[in-house]
Amino acid sequence: MGARHYSPEQIEAWAGPRVSAARLGAMYGDGRTTFIAVDVKDKPVAFSDMEADGHVDMLYCHPAQAGRGVASLLLAAIDGAARQAGLSRLHAEASETARPVFERAGYRMVMRRDFEIEGVAMHNWKMEKQV
């Protein structure tokens, strides 16, 4: 989610109570492969994941690192892991902010997805890629 593409109300609904240490711990304990990019001081600056079926659930890059290719490097690592796992397809629901990153990585837009979180209208983009 980015302030350039979403309202403060949308960002709060997206990141508010849904994002907690307990929820993220449960998600990342389900067997998915996690990818973390660190800076030269070993500080995490971006992360992503890939579920067993090729679903890329999250792609986040700290705003200070945006535009430097970090998210693209994570998606390239996911491509390699998908091929190694014998997957032929990756898929994601990309935010408006992440959509260009996925497109540059070879994902194609399938459809716009409109939904609500806590009564707040949202949208993202169903995208997929053959690997």
Image (tube, rainbow, N blue to C red):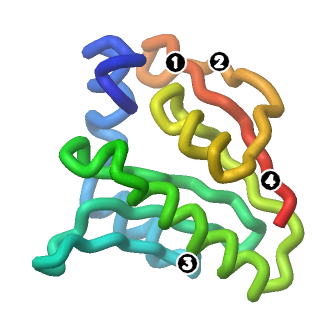
Mark 3: which amino acid? Thr
Mark 3 and mark 1 lie on one chain; the one further toward the N terminus is: 3
Q: Which residue is mark 3?
A: 33
Residue 129's disc is 4
Inter-mark Cα distance, 1 to 2? 6 Å
Q: Residues within 10 Å of mark 4 (few under 14, many from 20)?
A: some
Q: Position of residue 79 (x, y in %)?
A: 68, 70
Mark 1: which amino acid? Met
The residue closer to the viewer here, 124 or 119, is 124
Mark 4 and mark 1 lie on one chain; the one further toward the N terminus is: 1
Residue appearing at x 57%, y 54% in the figure? 57
Q: In the drawing, does residue 105 fall left or right of residue 13? A: right
Q: In the drawing, does residue 87 fall left or right of residue 48? A: right
- Helix, strand, or loop for circle 4? strand
Inter-mark Cα distance, 4 to 1? 23 Å
Q: Position of residue 124 (x, y in %)?
A: 60, 27
The residue closer to the viewer here, 41 or 21, is 41
User: Which dot, 4 or 1, sits closer to the camera?
Assistant: 4
Mark 4 and mark 3 lie on one chain; the one further toward the N terminus is: 3
Residue 122's disc is 1
The residue closer to the viewer here, 117 or 74, is 74
Inter-mark Cα distance, 4 to 3? 18 Å
Mark 4: which amino acid? Lys
Q: Which residue is mark 2?
A: 114
Residue appearing at x 58%, y 35% in the figure? 99
- Helix, strand, or loop for circle 3? strand
Inter-mark Cα distance, 3 to 1? 27 Å
Q: Vertically, is 27 above or below 123? A: below
